[in-house]
Amino acid sequence: MMKKEQPIIVGLDIGTTKVAVIAGRLNSAGKLQIIGNGHASFEAIVNGSILNVEQCTQAIDEAMKKCLDSAPGLDVKDIYMSVGGEHIKSFQTRGNKARTMPNEEINAKEVEQLTYEQFKTSIPANDEIIDIIPQKFILDNTAYVADPVGMLADKLGANFHIVTGNSGAIRNIKRCADRAGVSIKGMLLQSLASAKALIDTEDMEAGVAVVDIGGGTTDIAIYQDGILAYTAVIPYGGVNITNRICNELGVLHAQAEQIKIQYGRAISDEKESAEFVTVQGLRGLPSKDIPIKDLSAIIQQQVREILDYVAYHLKQANLSKPLHGGVILTGGGAQLKHITKLAESFTGLPVRVGYADAHFAEGQKETLMNPMYATCIGLILHGYKNDEKSRQHTEIAPLTDTIVIGVHEEEGYILADPDGTLVYEIPKKRQHGIKKMFGNLKGKFIGIFEDQALS
């Protein structure tokens, strides 16, 4: 019997200066086969907020068309999008619940229920919860349990890492995707998507910080003892380096970006004193010879400011022990020459540039061997993991055994087992996949009551 082919999943990364789209499928060996890719340059986002809806929509549309053109016949269905920006915040919280049947083994449904209950956590009025990541679990008086499934306890608790973002900023990004004809199945924080592409369980156990130097922001995700321990967003990135070059050397933005990429170095070197780059003058003005040493000094100054923030957040994380896995740099800014050496001097940790090549199928490694594509690769891997969880949930808690006891316009669906025990509430913001399942199986539910039944 032939094994069913894996679906194609698309990662859509909307950054400050570019939109990147990569379509991929896992092969029989579990490696990623790149089916198509495309990207478009634009500058319509500042600190994660849309400045020009039309430009952003056009950039998404252009990148998607390039991806589709690179693979004729490509059928795009499942698209996962990154989310980032200065408006992103995160915090830790604790959830606990007394078990009604303590003599029965804890199952995955109970863990999921406890996670869903964290959507009731109080957050600022203009924010929304993007992701809830369980950390260590607590069973009765036993703390730091990695996986409680199959164990016995009177009380189940857990520490959670909650990621939030500004509702307006997220809504506008989704609106641009919608206008471009793109249907988003799920979202993931940029730093977490990059981490999925770059680190494995050994890195997470040893302790590692993933630092994604993007166009407008630098995102940090720190892992220790196998869990996500800390996330942060620094409101500085590659654009700040380019702007500084523009201001101090008196060149156009496009020229500054070009010489930064081609000649830029994160550490100024005395050997560069005799090297120059020639930049075309404006409107008939003579060309300008710029010393490479001056260019490097400007870049070094701005990169030092970014790394100063990185070092600050490494201290703020209040880690229990050193990060033996060091720091992994990714994103477009990670391509600057000598940046690993400068980062080591600031963090006191070993630093390397991260590549997602370990996930690529044979012959694919050179196609997208660039740290700026790590987020897209991570989104695809996240998509497969998300699909796997959905299948497991169906096996654990079949919807045929679940009753919808209420549908509320604001709060969403409230579910219960046939015995009337409350299972969980699914907030409306999380209904993108659940609503579809309900529509397919609504004839099998015992009852659906009107909104008034909840009052």
Image: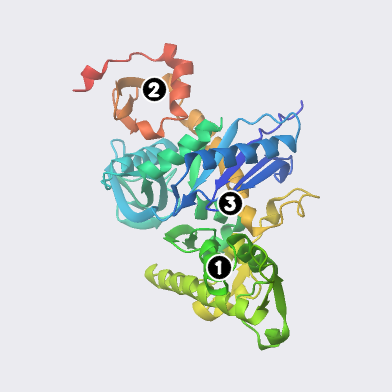
Across and down, in percent, residue 65 comes to 67, 36
Closer to the N terminus: mark 2 or mark 1? 1
In this view, the residue in front, 446 or 69, is 69
Closer to the N terminus: mark 2 or mark 3? 3
Task: Name the disc covering residue 229, or none.
Answer: none
The residue tagged 2 is 402
Q: Is residue 1 above or below residue 245?
A: above
Few, some or many residues within 10 Å of mark 3 (<14, 14–19, 20+): many
Across and down, in percent, residue 47 comes to 44, 55
Few, some or many residues within 10 Å of mark 2 (<14, 14–19, 20+): some
| Residue found at the far left of this picture | 455
- Which image quadrant: the C terminus? top left
In this view, the residue in front, 194 or 167, is 167
| Residue found at the far top of this picture | 443
The residue tagged 3 is 375
- Which image quadrant: the N terminus? top right
Residue at position x 26%, y 44% from top?
A: 125
How far apart are labels 2 and 3 at the CA level?
Answer: 36 Å
Task: Name the disc covering residue 246, or none.
Answer: 1
Identify the amino acid type marked 3: Thr
Q: Callout 3: helix, strand or loop?
A: helix
Across and down, in percent, residue 345 comes to 54, 81
Q: Is residue 228 above or below residue 3?
A: below
Q: Is residue 206 left or right of residue 47?
A: right
How far apart are labels 1 and 3 at the CA level?
Answer: 28 Å
Whether residue 211 is visible to the viewer of this picture, yes or no, is: no
Residue at position x 63%, y 39% from top?
A: 62
